[in-house]
Image (cartoon, rainbow, N blue to C red):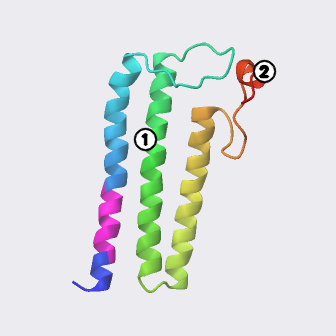
Amino acid sequence: MDFQQIIETVGRFMDFAGVAIMVVGALVSVPMALKGFQPRSLPAGTEPLSVYRSYRQLLGRSILLGLELLVAADIIRTVAVTPTFESVGVLAVIVLIRTFLSFSLELEITGRWPWQKEARTAQSASNPQ
């Protein structure tokens, strides 16, 4: 096996892992949401999540993780093998689309953009450590 074949194999494995995480996450999210899964850190004054909202958050997290692996696989295959302007351009478009999807999912899951700080609760604000 030469270097290019090894990189292609690693890229395919990462693609498979990304898709597998999304599929397994979708399947595992159903029973977790039905059992009433709640995130550890809900903002102060918010009510518990409904089953539907809980499922959406769990599913969104697994999609985010899967997208990260798919982006990594694309980067490995494009950069490790002799990159051309065309392949780097295609990679840039793919990464741009997946980054937009990741930001959208993060906003949907947490209710804030990734660069925004997490809102402090009244208890943690009164008891700084």
Report helix, strand or loop for mark 2: helix
The residue segment tinted magenta is: 7-16
Residue 37 position by quadrant: top left
Report helix, strand or loop for mark 1: helix
Position of the N terminus, as image quadrant, is bottom left
Q: Earlier in the sequence, mark 1 or mark 2?
A: 1
Residue 35 vertical placement versus 10 (above, below): above
x and y percentages locating residue 4 in the rendered image: 32, 83
Residue at 54% x, 55% y is: 98
Checking the image for residue 62, the label placed there is: 1
Instruction: Residue type at mark 1: give it.
Output: Ser
Residue at 69% x, 14% y is: 45
Residue at 31% x, 40% y is: 24
Residue at 26% x, 86% y is: 2
Residue extending furthest right? 126
Front position among marks 1 and 2: 2
Is residue 64 found left or right of 122 in the rendered image? left
Instruction: Residue type at mark 2: give it.
Output: Ser
Residue 129 position by quadrant: top right
Residue 108 vertical placement versus 101 (above, below): above
Residue 11 in magenta stretch:
yes
For the residues labelled 1 and 2, say whether their Cβ atoms are less than 8 Å apart. Answer: no
Q: Main secondary structure of the magenta part?
A: helix
Q: How crowded is the residue under tag 2: few (<14 C-alpha within 10 Å), some, or many (20+)? A: few
Checking the image for residue 96, the label placed there is: none
Question: Which residue is denoted by mark 2 in the rendering?
Answer: 126
x and y percentages locating residue 49 in the rendered image: 54, 18
Is residue 74 found left or right of 8 in the rendered image? right
Q: How crowded is the residue under tag 1: few (<14 C-alpha within 10 Å), some, or many (20+)? A: many
x and y percentages locating residue 61 in the rendered image: 48, 39
x and y percentages locating residue 74 in the rendered image: 44, 67
Distance from the alpha carbon under mark 1 to that under mark 2: 34 Å
